[in-house]
Structures are given as structure tokens and as C-alpha cells.
Image: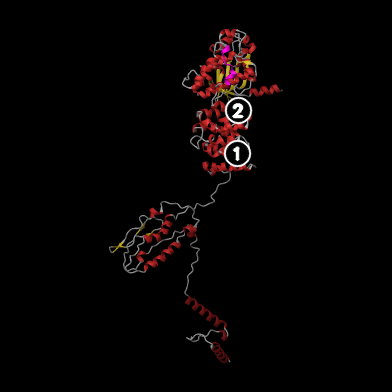
Amino acid sequence: MGAQESTGRKQQQVIDVKDDVPRDAKAYKLWSNIHQAVKNHSLPCTIFVKKLDRSDGSLKYYENGIKLLKQLKHPYILKFLDGTCTATDVSLVTERVQMLDHSIESLSIDEIQSGLYHILEAVLFLHTKASLSHNNLTPASIFVASNGEWKLGGFEFSCPLKDSHQFLKSQFSSSVRLPEYLPPKEERDSSQTTSLFSGDAYSFGKLIEFVLASRSDEEEKVRSLREVAAQLASGDPAQRIQLPALFAHPALSNSLIQIIEFCNTIHLKTDEEKDEFFRDIVPRLRCIPGDVVARRLSRLLLSRYVLLEKRCQSELYPALLVPAGDQNGILPRDHFQSHMIPEILRLFKVRESAVRIILLSHFHGYARYIPHERLVGFVTDEVIQGCFDSDSQLVAASLRALATLVEIAGADAVCPWPISKTFANGSPMRSRTSASATSNFFSVNYVDGTKVNDGAETEKKVSAVVSGDQNGSWSDEGIADWNNDSSWSSDWKGDDKSTSDPEPETAKEIPDVVESHSSTFRVNTPPDSKKTIGSEFEISVPTQRSLEDELLADLTPKITTTSLVDQLTTLQSTINALSAAKKVPPKFAMVDTVEETEGWDETMNESLTSVEDVVMKEQK
């Protein structure tokens, strides 16, 4: 049952073949066809295919290579995905890689040193852990992964050291392996060697010569590597450098290698070693070409163990998570967008509070470089999710990131709640400054050939009206008090009364006529000299009515006032009419008496009493 399910799952796998690897690759010495492909519509991969000839006995070598590739697990050994062997053909599916001989020209000397160092690690792993000799260290067995790492493959001729002589003694082995990378013939024919794995050491020296073929000796690193290659390719096996000794050699040491090795083993380092490493990591990264840092270190510097180091958060990420030119970043902008942004987006899928807080703490530095569709979609959703977490620190960081998103994409695209207009914009909409509006207002005026006034005092009185007229249009009509000019016009009328009283031999101020909704002022010459003195200078300031005032104009009560004398007369008439109708007793009736000029005196009560007696007698 389990075998059937496994077979069913295997049949469902789909591999879409894309481009063919150019035929001049050295790997075609071992394979018939090499294709770049995609497995299950998502996983990039490389397919190696070999059409077998039953007469050459090659099947056992390919079976050996697939078996070892499936068993060996190392960071710098080619990753096995799938493989099958039949009597007629062999197919091998691995991670997506490029051929070394097609990539070597585009690599810097730092990357070459790093690649050789990692291949050396894989070879020594094969020697010490698996007790196997590779026996085919050539450019056909070295591949370059998408992240720039070199991977060791080509295990078809690998075997234990004691079986190497017999295993490699075949026609197929002699026809496939590149002769320039093989030890001298007498060494291959001898079953006894004075040095263990001397054949792999010789091939490694020839590999160094191949990768440096187009390099100039002007660089110190190149000269040092050539010296190592010459010692490894010595004809005398006893004179060759032991491969483990190369780890400490300066030729295979640089900042790139040291940073990679430290980050890969950071969980094994002490606090003192971590402090020393992160203290100068930024200057060391600046010494490495930006494209190399982006291609080789982007993912490594954002790995879990590195990400959670406190010194890394304070020393490295402020410079790593922003592009060069923005806050002194390390990576150029194009490399930052092509390599660092995808790694940041990948980390946003990790639902771990510590990782998310670190990403959000530097969000303002890289948010604007995220593609817009990813920013307002995936990233915004993740930031909003953090706002609902129970961790207060995460919520605070998420809200700060949300504010950054609003600045970049706008509130409508970011905020999860409805957006509406709640606050009015009360700032004045200035078309030009008050100074420019009044620059043509004041001028020197002459009356009968005499200089009147330079407008200094008029400027003080009119400045408020000018600024009100210039800046009187507000964004919100609901602010009626700010748009009401009636109080201003009343002040101007009071000023007019004061200016209407002429003073002898004193120059008169000539104010301008201020027109509503206009920034221009004109001086009107009085056409009729018979009018009241000063009336020609009267300033008319029509008030600007708001929409609310116009709608409520008809509902405003019109109250007219009367004088006090008229009010008393009307009141007296009303009292008389009421007295006649109700026949008020005479003692309460109002009687007209002659007004005494002396006013009220002490005889007041007597006069009142006598009047009352007279009235009582008449009634009787």
C-alpha cells in the first residue's frame, strides 16, 4: 500500500523543461543533455540526461553517482531532487545550477576564493566523514548555485581510497575524465601512494589554475593562489600541500569567506567573539563589491540566528536595511531592490514576534522600495495583523509601520477602517502675500499742489481689511465667525465719522475704495463738490455672506425701534382706554394736574388728600 502511494505521488510530479545548457559546457563530457527546468510549476531545477551504450559498462558508474549524491548531505554538495537509472538511459534532477566554466568570467576574485574554499570543505568532508576519494575534481563536476555558492557534484567515480585503483581501471573512466586534471600516469598505475588522497590534491591544484586562467598577476590574491596551485600540482606527491592545511593559508582567506563562515556557525560562538565580529562588520562589508554582498550575503545576514543577535540589530541592520545614499546604506539601490527586498518579503511570512519587530523597527528605511502592489497588498495585510496581537511592543511597532504606509500609499489604500472627512481645514488659501497686495495701494497724493499724506496711518487702518479680503476664502464654509466682515465694516464707519470733521490746514487722508473679492484698490475722484464734506472718501466694504447666512436671511426677524416718548404716549393711551371701559374708581384714575416747578415737597400728602375729598363730594 505504501509503495503504491509513493508511486502515485511520483507520477503526479511535473517537470517543465525550459532552456538547454550550451553544448560547449565541460559537463557534456559526462552527460548527453542538460536542461534548465521547473519542477511542479514552482521549484527551479536542472536535469542531466545520459543515453547509455550497453557495451561500455557505464551504467554502474551512473548508479554509483546517483546513490552517493542521494546519501551525502553537505551545504556545498549538489542537492539531489530525483533520479532514475534504466538499461538505456539515466536522468538526474538537482537544484538549479549553472556550469562553472560558463560562470567563471563573471565572478570576482573574492567569489573565486570563496568558491574554492567551499569546494575544499566538501572534498575534506568526503575524505574525513565518508572515507571516499572523489577522483574527478574538474570543472565538469563543479557547479554554481543561484545564490553564488559553488557546489560539488560528479560522484560517478568516487569510491573508497583502497578501491580507487581497481574501480577506475576501465575504458569508460579513461574516456570521460579529463586527462589534464588527472595525476601523472605512473602515479595512477601505482597501487601504493605516499600521501592519502594525493590524487584529489593534484586535481584541486589544476582546478585553481583553470579558474585563474583569465586573471592578471597584478593582484596579490591571484599571485598567492597561483603559488598554491603550483605546489598542489607538483609531480612528486610528497611535495604537495596537504589539503587540510589550506584552510589557514592566506590565499583562501578574505572578508567574504570569514563573514560566511562566522554566520554559518554563529550559534557556536561566544559572546566575546560575537561582539568582536559585529563591531567592525559594516566596514568589512563596504570593502566587498556591492553585487557580491547582495548575491552572497543577503539571505545569510537575514538568517534566523543572525537576525536575533542584539549586536546585529544595533550595528548591522541600520546600514544593511537601507540602500546606499539613504542614511549611509551598504548596498547600491539596484542591488538592494533585486536581492534585499525579496529576502525582506520572505521574512514577512514568518509569524514570529521577534523577527517581525526587527523588520518593523527599520520599516521606514526600506518600505518605499517595495513594489507598490506588494506594499499595499501583502505587506499592508501583515502589518495590520500585527496591530491585533497581544504583544504591546509588536502592536506599537505595527502602528508605527502603518503610519509609514499611510505616508507612502495614502490612508484609503492602507487603513482597514472607513475613511471620511471629520476635521475641517482652517488654513488660509493664500494667492499672494499681504505685502504684494498692498504694494500698489498707497501712493503720494497731492491736493492743490500740496503733498497730503503718504498713507502711513491709512495703512494701519486698512491692513486688517486687506488681509481679510486676501485671505478671506477658507476651505470650510461652516466657520461663519471667520468669514463675517460686518464688525470690520462697522469699524470703518466709525472711522469715517472721525474723518468727516475737517481740521483747518491739515492734509486729508484719501483712503481707497475696497472692492469685495478683489485684491485691487482704486482712488475715486469726487465728481460733485456740493456733497457733505468727507462723503467722497467714504469707504464701502460690502460683507461677504456665507451660504448659511443666505439660507437663513428670510427667517431673521426684522425689529424696528421707536423713541421713548412715543412708547410712553402709546402706554398712556392704552391706560385711558382701559380705565374708561372698566370704570376704574376715581381714586385710582389718573388726573392731569399742573406741574409745579418747585418739585415734590412736604405738602404732597395734603394736596392728594384734598383732591380725594373733592371727588368724594361730587359723587355724593
Residue 470 image point, x, y percent: 42, 55
Label 1 Cα crowd, 10 Å radius (few <14 / some 14-19 / many 20+) = some
State which tag comes first along the sequence, 2 or 1. 2
Direction from residue 470 to residue 328 in the image, left or right = right
* Vertical order, 59 against 399 (above or below): above
Q: Find numbered disc 1 in the image and state the secondary structure of the residue it sits on.
A: helix
Amino acid of disc 2: Asn
> Label 2 belongs to which residue?
264
- Give the camera-side residue of 589 and 356: 356
- Give the camera-side residue of 156 and 529: 156
> Label 1 belongs to which residue?
357
Give the magenta-colored segment's residue range: 237-247
The tag on residue 509 is none
- The reply to whether dot 2 and dot 1 touch (C-beta < 8 Å) is no
Residue 550 image point, x, y percent: 47, 59
Q: Say if the magenta span includes residue 243.
A: yes
Residue 522 image point, x, y percent: 35, 58
Residue 207: image quadrant is top right
